[in-house]
């Protein structure tokens, strides 16, 4: 949480740090809105602190995010979020500046949403026997809506690939991560700050298509991990990886497999049954996380419910 505390204005930082020790590890979001109480979110429930974000606090946060050089954040401001050390994502809202009908930047910021990334070792353990078959990892797609735990699960599966699993006689494999949004590995100066074992190579803040091609040509990974395929270029690069015999672990944003099956980038791979295993994540009305394992045809193989946040 240190990188998050450093981002918060002193008064708000103090209020958050005074929370009970057992509360902090459960936080999912810290939402800051000018003139409104600070909102803390955990398991879809909100709590409000008796303190609000002031206009002068906005410059403080922006200074921390940009290291006092906003022009260095042009790309992040176009996307509407900044990823900070540890893989935490800070969403921004305010007045949008357009250029030729496209978003150029955001100015006059009124809201910040700090989404807290967690490293949870073991969340992928349950699925290893299904993803390791005939002496190799199989192509795997993780599907889920925001805050269902896609990246957390992908991160733990990546850790297992790199470290191996002695109890199941699975050797460690060369792992390549193309971390376009700096969320998977939480790199600092190019070095992963999260746990991945010794056989991991990361291209941090690199566009997926370009990064996949760079990994294929220079690092020869056994397994290539990328988050949120979306562009046509991503599809082309993924085909190059498949032709090179590299296993793909990736995610797709959507409420269900049926929903993402309509995505132009993913549809061809799903129709061709490329993904041998599909992990579909969702949350029940009671807040429980539900993971459904499907085969390449979309048929359910197994499922798991958990009360823990992913």
Image (cartoon, helix red, strand yellow):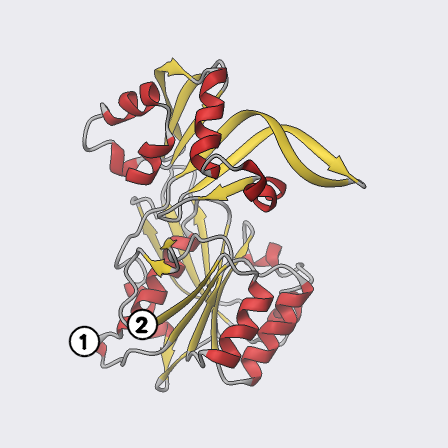
Q: Earlier in the sequence, mark 2 or mark 1?
A: 2
- Residue drawn at (38%, 58%), measured in percent from left and top? 185
The Cα atoms of the two marked residues, 2 and 1, are separated by 15 Å
Rendering coords of residue 86 (x, y %): 35, 48
Q: Which mark is residue 71?
A: none
Secondary element at tag 1: helix
Closer mark to the observer between disc 2 and disc 1: 2
| Viewer-proximal residue among 5 and 304 | 5
Can residue 167 be seen from the camera position used here?
yes
User: Which image quadrant is residue 100 in?
Assistant: top right
- Residue drawn at (37%, 81%), measured in percent from left and top? 133
- Residue drawn at (53%, 41%), measured in percent from left and top? 81
Q: Residues within 10 Å of mark 2 (few under 14, many from 20)?
A: many
Q: Residues within 10 Å of mark 1 (few under 14, many from 20)?
A: few
Secondary element at tag 2: helix
Can residue 1 be seen from the camera position used here?
no
Rendering coords of residue 6 (x, y %): 33, 33
Q: Quick one: quadrant of the N terminus?
A: top left
Side (left or right) of 238 relative to 27: right
When the figure is inspected, residue 193 is found, relative to residue 167, above or below; the finding is above
| Viewer-proximal residue among 308 and 252 | 252
User: Which image quadrant is residue 17 in?
Assistant: top left
When the figure is inspected, residue 107 is found, relative to residue 136, above or below; the finding is above
- Which residue does the numbered mark 1 point to in the structure image? 167
When the figure is inspected, residue 176 is found, relative to residue 114, above or below; the finding is below
| Viewer-proximal residue among 5 and 120 | 5
Farthest residue, direction front: 69
| Viewer-proximal residue among 39 and 184 | 184
- Residue drawn at (27%, 81%), measured in percent from left and top? 171
Rendering coords of residue 94 (x, y %): 60, 27
- Which residue does the numbered mark 2 point to in the structure image? 162
């Amino acid at each position: 949480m240190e990188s998050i505390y450093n981002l918060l204005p002193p008064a708000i930082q103090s209020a958050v740090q005074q929370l009970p020790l057992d509360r902090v590890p459960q936080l999912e979001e810290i939402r800051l809105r000018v003139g409104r109480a600070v909102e803390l979110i955990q398991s879809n429930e909100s709590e409000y602190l008796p303190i609000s974000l002031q206009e002068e606090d906005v410059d403080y946060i922006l200074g921390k995010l940009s290291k006092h050089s906003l022009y260095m954040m042009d790309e992040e401001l176009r996307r509407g979020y900044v990823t900070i050390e540890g893989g935490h994502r800070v969403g921004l809202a305010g007045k949008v500046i357009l250029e030729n009908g496209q978003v150029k930047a955001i100015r006059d910021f009124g809201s910040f949403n700090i989404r807290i990334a967690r490293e949870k070792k073991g969340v992928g353990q349950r699925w290893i026997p299904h993803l390791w078959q005939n002496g190799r990892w199989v192509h795997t797609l993780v599907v889920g809506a925001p805050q269902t735990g896609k990246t957390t699960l992908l991160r733990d599966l990546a850790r297992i690939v790199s470290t191996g699993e002695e109890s199941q006689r699975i050797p460690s494999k060369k792992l390549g991560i193309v971390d376009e949004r700096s969320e998977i590995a939480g790199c600092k100066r190019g070095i992963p700050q999260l746990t991945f074992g010794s056989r991991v190579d990361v291209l941090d803040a690199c566009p997926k298509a370009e990064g996949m091609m760079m990994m294929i040509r220079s690092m020869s990974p056994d397994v290539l991990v990328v988050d949120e395929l979306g562009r046509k270029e991503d599809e082309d690069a993924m085909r190059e990886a498949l032709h090179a015999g590299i296993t793909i672990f990736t995610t797709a944003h959507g409420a269900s497999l049926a929903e993402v099956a309509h995505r132009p980038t993913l549809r061809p791979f799903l129709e061709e049954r490329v993904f041998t295993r599909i992990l579909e994540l969702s949350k029940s009305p009671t807040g429980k996380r539900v993971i459904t394992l499907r085969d390449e045809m979309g048929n359910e193989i197994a499922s798991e419910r958990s009360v823990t946040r992913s």
